[in-house]
Image: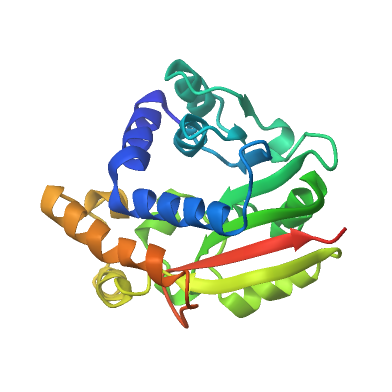
Amino acid sequence: MEKDFCKTYFEAEKSHWWFKVRRNIVLSLIKKYKIPKTAKIFDFGCGSGYTVGYLQKLGYDVSGVDVSAEAIEFGLSRGIRNLSVARDGGISHPEGSFDLVLALDVIEHIEDDLGAIRGLKEALKPRGMAIITVPAYQWMWGVQDEVAHHFRRYTISSLKSAVREVDNLTIVRKTYFNTILFPPIAIVRIISRWFNLKERESDFDINNRFLNSLSYFIFNLETYLLKFLNFPFGVSILFVLKKNG
Protein backbone atom coordinates (compact mmCIF):
# COMPACT_ATOMS: atom_id res chain seq x y z
CA MET A 1 0.00 0.00 0.00
CA GLU A 2 1.51 3.31 -1.10
CA LYS A 3 1.83 6.09 1.47
CA ASP A 4 -0.38 8.45 -0.57
CA PHE A 5 -3.08 5.76 -0.70
CA CYS A 6 -2.66 5.16 3.06
CA LYS A 7 -3.52 8.81 3.65
CA THR A 8 -6.50 8.64 1.29
CA TYR A 9 -7.79 5.44 2.88
CA PHE A 10 -7.27 6.82 6.41
CA GLU A 11 -9.32 9.91 5.52
CA ALA A 12 -12.02 7.69 3.95
CA GLU A 13 -12.20 5.63 7.17
CA LYS A 14 -12.60 8.87 9.10
CA SER A 15 -15.31 10.55 7.05
CA HIS A 16 -16.89 8.24 4.45
CA TRP A 17 -20.46 7.24 5.27
CA TRP A 18 -19.84 3.52 4.85
CA PHE A 19 -16.91 3.34 7.27
CA LYS A 20 -18.62 5.61 9.80
CA VAL A 21 -21.77 3.53 9.96
CA ARG A 22 -19.90 0.21 10.04
CA ARG A 23 -17.96 1.63 13.00
CA ASN A 24 -21.23 2.64 14.70
CA ILE A 25 -22.60 -0.88 14.20
CA VAL A 26 -19.46 -2.46 15.67
CA LEU A 27 -19.55 -0.14 18.70
CA SER A 28 -23.24 -0.96 19.19
CA LEU A 29 -22.36 -4.69 19.22
CA ILE A 30 -19.51 -4.11 21.68
CA LYS A 31 -22.02 -2.48 24.01
CA LYS A 32 -24.74 -5.08 23.36
CA TYR A 33 -22.46 -7.95 24.31
CA LYS A 34 -21.13 -6.01 27.29
CA ILE A 35 -17.47 -6.04 26.28
CA PRO A 36 -15.82 -4.11 29.15
CA LYS A 37 -13.14 -1.50 28.58
CA THR A 38 -10.73 -3.75 30.45
CA ALA A 39 -11.15 -6.43 27.76
CA LYS A 40 -8.37 -6.99 25.23
CA ILE A 41 -9.63 -6.22 21.72
CA PHE A 42 -7.74 -7.09 18.55
CA ASP A 43 -8.39 -5.65 15.07
CA PHE A 44 -7.11 -8.11 12.46
CA GLY A 45 -6.47 -6.38 9.13
CA CYS A 46 -6.74 -2.93 10.68
CA GLY A 47 -5.35 -0.98 7.69
CA SER A 48 -3.85 2.23 8.97
CA GLY A 49 -5.67 1.74 12.26
CA TYR A 50 -8.39 4.38 12.30
CA THR A 51 -10.87 2.06 14.04
CA VAL A 52 -8.20 1.06 16.56
CA GLY A 53 -7.56 4.72 17.34
CA TYR A 54 -11.29 5.47 17.54
CA LEU A 55 -11.86 2.73 20.13
CA GLN A 56 -8.71 3.72 22.05
CA LYS A 57 -10.10 7.25 22.41
CA LEU A 58 -13.25 5.72 23.93
CA GLY A 59 -11.09 4.00 26.54
CA TYR A 60 -10.87 0.46 25.11
CA ASP A 61 -7.69 -1.63 25.20
CA VAL A 62 -7.24 -2.23 21.47
CA SER A 63 -4.37 -3.37 19.26
CA GLY A 64 -4.25 -4.10 15.55
CA VAL A 65 -2.18 -5.69 12.81
CA ASP A 66 -2.08 -5.38 9.04
CA VAL A 67 0.03 -6.88 6.27
CA SER A 68 0.92 -3.40 4.97
CA ALA A 69 3.96 -1.94 6.70
CA GLU A 70 3.20 1.41 5.04
CA ALA A 71 -0.32 1.47 6.47
CA ILE A 72 0.93 0.63 9.97
CA GLU A 73 3.64 3.28 9.72
CA PHE A 74 1.03 5.86 8.69
CA GLY A 75 -1.25 4.96 11.61
CA LEU A 76 1.61 5.15 14.12
CA SER A 77 2.55 8.56 12.73
CA ARG A 78 -1.00 9.70 13.56
CA GLY A 79 -0.57 8.77 17.22
CA ILE A 80 -2.41 5.44 17.17
CA ARG A 81 -0.89 2.98 19.61
CA ASN A 82 -0.40 -0.80 19.56
CA LEU A 83 -0.19 -1.27 15.80
CA SER A 84 2.10 -3.85 14.21
CA VAL A 85 2.78 -5.57 10.90
CA ALA A 86 1.28 -9.06 10.55
CA ARG A 87 3.93 -11.75 10.20
CA ASP A 88 3.26 -14.08 7.26
CA GLY A 89 -0.15 -12.44 6.91
CA GLY A 90 -1.53 -14.11 10.03
CA ILE A 91 -2.12 -13.57 13.74
CA SER A 92 1.17 -14.06 15.56
CA HIS A 93 -0.13 -13.56 19.11
CA PRO A 94 -0.19 -16.47 21.57
CA GLU A 95 -3.31 -18.61 21.67
CA GLY A 96 -6.05 -17.25 23.91
CA SER A 97 -4.82 -13.64 23.92
CA PHE A 98 -8.01 -11.65 23.29
CA ASP A 99 -11.54 -11.19 24.57
CA LEU A 100 -12.78 -9.78 21.24
CA VAL A 101 -11.37 -10.03 17.73
CA LEU A 102 -12.56 -7.82 14.87
CA ALA A 103 -12.17 -8.91 11.24
CA LEU A 104 -13.92 -6.12 9.37
CA ASP A 105 -14.00 -6.84 5.64
CA VAL A 106 -10.78 -8.82 5.86
CA ILE A 107 -11.25 -12.53 5.18
CA GLU A 108 -12.43 -11.95 1.60
CA HIS A 109 -8.85 -10.70 0.98
CA ILE A 110 -7.37 -14.02 2.17
CA GLU A 111 -7.24 -17.00 -0.16
CA ASP A 112 -7.38 -19.49 2.72
CA ASP A 113 -10.41 -18.09 4.52
CA LEU A 114 -10.77 -21.23 6.67
CA GLY A 115 -7.22 -20.73 7.90
CA ALA A 116 -8.04 -17.10 8.71
CA ILE A 117 -11.12 -18.10 10.70
CA ARG A 118 -9.09 -20.73 12.58
CA GLY A 119 -6.52 -18.04 13.38
CA LEU A 120 -9.24 -15.77 14.77
CA LYS A 121 -10.53 -18.62 16.95
CA GLU A 122 -7.09 -19.47 18.28
CA ALA A 123 -6.44 -15.83 19.19
CA LEU A 124 -9.58 -15.76 21.36
CA LYS A 125 -9.77 -16.59 25.01
CA PRO A 126 -12.35 -19.25 25.97
CA ARG A 127 -15.79 -17.62 25.62
CA GLY A 128 -14.19 -14.76 23.71
CA MET A 129 -16.09 -13.26 20.77
CA ALA A 130 -15.36 -12.31 17.17
CA ILE A 131 -17.14 -9.79 14.93
CA ILE A 132 -16.74 -10.53 11.22
CA THR A 133 -18.02 -8.50 8.27
CA VAL A 134 -17.68 -9.48 4.60
CA PRO A 135 -19.15 -8.32 1.26
CA ALA A 136 -22.24 -10.17 0.03
CA TYR A 137 -23.20 -11.92 -3.23
CA GLN A 138 -20.73 -12.95 -5.91
CA TRP A 139 -23.05 -11.48 -8.57
CA MET A 140 -22.35 -8.03 -7.08
CA TRP A 141 -18.67 -8.33 -7.95
CA GLY A 142 -17.42 -4.92 -9.10
CA VAL A 143 -14.52 -2.52 -9.41
CA GLN A 144 -14.13 -2.30 -5.62
CA ASP A 145 -13.52 -6.05 -5.44
CA GLU A 146 -10.91 -5.78 -8.19
CA VAL A 147 -8.94 -2.89 -6.68
CA ALA A 148 -9.14 -4.42 -3.17
CA HIS A 149 -7.91 -7.81 -4.48
CA HIS A 150 -10.83 -9.79 -3.10
CA PHE A 151 -10.91 -13.54 -3.62
CA ARG A 152 -14.67 -13.87 -3.17
CA ARG A 153 -17.93 -12.42 -1.91
CA TYR A 154 -20.20 -14.44 0.40
CA THR A 155 -23.73 -15.40 1.22
CA ILE A 156 -24.81 -16.13 4.77
CA SER A 157 -24.96 -19.80 3.79
CA SER A 158 -21.40 -19.90 2.39
CA LEU A 159 -19.93 -18.02 5.36
CA LYS A 160 -21.84 -20.25 7.79
CA SER A 161 -20.43 -23.32 6.02
CA ALA A 162 -16.91 -21.93 6.37
CA VAL A 163 -17.37 -21.18 10.08
CA ARG A 164 -18.77 -24.67 10.73
CA GLU A 165 -15.59 -26.17 9.29
CA VAL A 166 -13.78 -24.67 12.31
CA ASP A 167 -14.43 -26.51 15.54
CA ASN A 168 -15.13 -24.88 18.89
CA LEU A 169 -16.95 -21.85 17.44
CA THR A 170 -20.62 -20.95 17.94
CA ILE A 171 -22.49 -18.54 15.66
CA VAL A 172 -24.20 -16.07 17.98
CA ARG A 173 -25.58 -13.72 15.32
CA LYS A 174 -25.78 -13.72 11.53
CA THR A 175 -27.40 -11.08 9.35
CA TYR A 176 -27.03 -9.11 6.18
CA PHE A 177 -26.69 -5.35 6.50
CA ASN A 178 -26.44 -2.24 4.30
CA THR A 179 -29.93 -3.30 3.23
CA ILE A 180 -31.78 0.01 2.80
CA LEU A 181 -29.24 1.20 0.21
CA PHE A 182 -29.03 -2.21 -1.44
CA PRO A 183 -31.20 -1.37 -4.51
CA PRO A 184 -29.21 1.66 -5.77
CA ILE A 185 -25.86 0.01 -5.01
CA ALA A 186 -26.92 -3.17 -6.84
CA ILE A 187 -28.11 -1.14 -9.85
CA VAL A 188 -24.79 0.74 -10.06
CA ARG A 189 -22.85 -2.54 -9.84
CA ILE A 190 -24.96 -4.25 -12.51
CA ILE A 191 -24.93 -1.31 -14.95
CA SER A 192 -21.18 -0.86 -14.49
CA ARG A 193 -20.63 -4.52 -15.35
CA TRP A 194 -23.05 -4.59 -18.28
CA PHE A 195 -21.49 -1.53 -19.91
CA ASN A 196 -17.95 -2.29 -18.78
CA LEU A 197 -17.68 1.06 -16.97
CA LYS A 198 -14.28 1.23 -15.27
CA GLU A 199 -13.58 4.96 -15.10
CA ARG A 200 -13.58 5.18 -11.31
CA GLU A 201 -10.79 3.71 -9.22
CA SER A 202 -13.10 2.45 -6.46
CA ASP A 203 -16.64 2.77 -5.11
CA PHE A 204 -15.40 5.48 -2.75
CA ASP A 205 -15.08 7.80 -5.77
CA ILE A 206 -18.89 7.97 -6.00
CA ASN A 207 -19.18 10.52 -3.26
CA ASN A 208 -19.66 14.20 -2.44
CA ARG A 209 -20.66 16.08 0.67
CA PHE A 210 -24.41 15.86 -0.01
CA LEU A 211 -24.35 12.18 -0.97
CA ASN A 212 -22.08 11.40 1.96
CA SER A 213 -24.48 13.03 4.44
CA LEU A 214 -27.58 11.51 2.87
CA SER A 215 -26.09 8.02 2.65
CA TYR A 216 -24.86 8.25 6.24
CA PHE A 217 -28.32 9.25 7.47
CA ILE A 218 -30.01 6.41 5.60
CA PHE A 219 -27.45 3.70 6.37
CA ASN A 220 -27.13 4.73 10.01
CA LEU A 221 -30.80 3.84 10.57
CA GLU A 222 -29.57 0.24 10.46
CA THR A 223 -27.43 0.84 13.56
CA TYR A 224 -30.71 1.09 15.47
CA LEU A 225 -32.72 -1.46 13.47
CA LEU A 226 -30.03 -4.14 13.94
CA LYS A 227 -30.67 -3.97 17.68
CA PHE A 228 -34.08 -5.55 17.04
CA LEU A 229 -33.93 -7.55 13.80
CA ASN A 230 -31.84 -9.36 11.23
CA PHE A 231 -31.98 -8.38 7.56
CA PRO A 232 -32.71 -11.02 4.87
CA PHE A 233 -30.40 -9.42 2.27
CA GLY A 234 -27.89 -6.61 1.96
CA VAL A 235 -24.60 -5.45 0.48
CA SER A 236 -22.66 -6.88 3.43
CA ILE A 237 -22.84 -9.70 5.98
CA LEU A 238 -22.25 -9.59 9.73
CA PHE A 239 -21.41 -12.58 11.93
CA VAL A 240 -20.85 -12.59 15.68
CA LEU A 241 -19.03 -15.72 16.87
CA LYS A 242 -18.15 -17.09 20.31
CA LYS A 243 -15.34 -19.47 21.19
CA ASN A 244 -16.65 -22.31 23.31
CA GLY A 245 -15.17 -22.59 26.76
Whole-percent x and y of residue 189? 31, 70
The answer to whether residue 73 is seen in the rendering is: yes
Q: How did the renderer colour the structure? A: rainbow
Instruction: Give the residue at x 53% y 61%.
Output: 134
Residue sitting nearer the eye, 27 or 232: 27
Relative to 93, is 23 above or below?
Answer: below
Q: Residue furthest left?
A: 210
Residue sitting nearer the eye, 30 or 67: 30
Instruction: Give the residue at x 48% y 78%.
Output: 229
Report whether 133 appears left or right of 186: right
Report whether 142 appears left or right of 212: right
The C terminus sits in image quarter: bottom right
The answer to whether residue 197 is seen in the rendering is: no
Q: Disc count in the image?
A: 0
Whole-percent x and y of residue 70? 50, 24
Instruction: Give the residue at x 76% y 68%.
Output: 170
